[in-house]
Image (cartoon, rainbow, N blue to C red):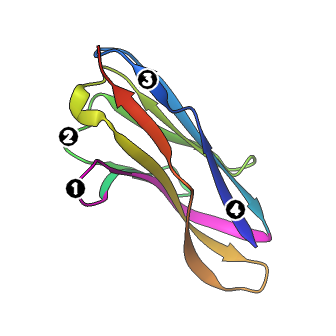
Amino acid sequence: QVQLVESGGGLVQPGGSLRLSCAASGSILSSNVMGWYRQAPGKQRELVATITSGGSTNYADSVKGRFTISRDNAKKTVYLQMNSLKPEDTAVYYCQSLIKTVDWVLRGYWGQGTQVTVSS
């Protein structure tokens, strides 16, 4: 069984920063792409950023230049550094990872989500 546990959300003023973390645990053989998605009230879940095991990154246009995704493969952890936060960044942020378990099954897993609220 695999678990993704997120942390680091909270309330921040516009222009502020937050760092999200997501740690994977369980019967993991390898973790390929890891990423962050978000879902604002009344909206569909959208991609924020992804990172491959080799370190290649991809960002949504709305966060380019403000957010940075990184990962520590040894710790099976992915991070999202969010700077210059805007009210429109308010959402529940979800970690997602494509993981191969020890039984050689490859599938995607989701974390439980962490709330990020940007407000003065």
Disc 1: which residue: 43
N-term mark: 1 or 3: 3
Question: Looking at the image, do the residues carrying marks 1 and 4 touch, with CB atoms under 8 Å apart?
Answer: no
**Numbered badge on residue 62:** 2
Q: Quadrant of the N terminus?
A: bottom right
Circle 4: residue type: Gln
Q: Which residue is the site of mark 3?
A: 11
Q: Is residue 102 left or right of residue 68?
A: right
Comes first in the chain, label 2 or label 4? 4
Which callout, 3 or 4, points to the residue nearer the camera? 3
Residue corresponding to mark 4:
3
- Pick the front one: 113 or 109: 113
- Of the numbered discs 3 and 4, the one sitting upstream in the chain is 4
CA distance separating discs 2 and 1: 15 Å
Identify the amino acid type marked 1: Lys
Crowding at dot 4, Cα within 10 Å, few <14 / some 14-19 / many 20+, comes out as some
Q: CA distance from mark 1 to mark 3?
A: 20 Å
Instruction: Tell me, yes or no, if residue 36 can be seen here.
Output: yes
Cα–Cα gap, marks 3 and 4 = 25 Å
Q: Is residue 27 above or below residue 53?
A: below
Q: Which region of the structure is painted magenta?
A: 27-45
Does the magenta stretch mainly form a helix, a strand or a loop?
strand
Q: Residue 109 sits in which quadrant? A: bottom right
User: Looking at the image, is mark 1 or mark 4 nearer the viewer?
Assistant: 1
Residue 23 x/y as whole percent:
67, 49
**Three-letter amino acid code at disc 2?**
Ser
